[in-house]
Amino acid sequence: MDDTPPRHLHLDRDRGLEVEWPDGRRIHYPIAWLRRMSPSADSRELRKELESNPLAVLPAGTSSGPLRAEAIEPVGNYAIRLRFSDGHASGIYSWRYLREIEPQEPAS
């Protein structure tokens, strides 16, 4: 997998993150997808729990409205950190990880 940084990032706080990779591909990562796929330890554990027990109770968020991305910040030259409206801000999304979790878009 490639660790090359993207050419361009654009965050629409309500819709998602648009990434343009050096090969010219543009990938849209919806906010809810990024939050669900957060690489933080607590999110990884929650995904494991849901895989083994689909009836697991999800933790309540601290947001009183629709999920939004409140901020984006660089982490060195290898990743970004997103802060979400539900208070989650511990996931560091490396360039490699973003490529691994590219949402599958329906063929048009």
Image (cartoon, helix red, strand yellow):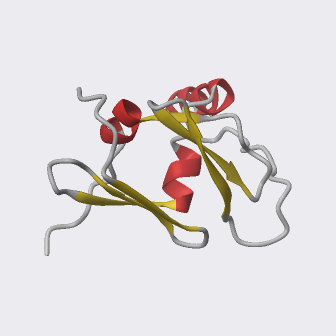
Q: Point out residue 47 in the picture as x, y percentages from the top left corner.
A: 55, 33
In the rendered image, the vertical position of residue 28 relative to residue 33, given as above or below: below
Q: Point out residue 97 in the picture as x, y percentages from the top left corner.
A: 39, 33
In the rendered image, the vertical position of residue 103 relative to residue 3, given as above or below: below
Query: Dividing the picture into quarters, in which one does residue 46 lie?
Result: top right
Residue at (60% x, 73% y) in the render = 14
Residue at (26% x, 62% y) in the render = 105
Nearer-the-camera pick, 30 or 76: 76
Q: How many marks?
A: 0
Quadrant that contains the C terminus:
bottom left
For residue 105, side relative to residue 77 (left or right)? left
Nearer-the-camera pick, 12 or 59: 12
For residue 57, side relative to residue 106 (left or right)? right
Q: Point out residue 100 in the picture as x, y percentages from the top left corner.
A: 32, 36
Quadrant that contains the N terminus:
top left
Residue at (24% x, 29% y) in the render = 2
Residue at (31% x, 28% y) in the render = 3
Nearer-the-camera pick, 46 or 70: 70
Q: Point out residue 36 in the picture as x, y percentages from the top left corner.
A: 56, 47
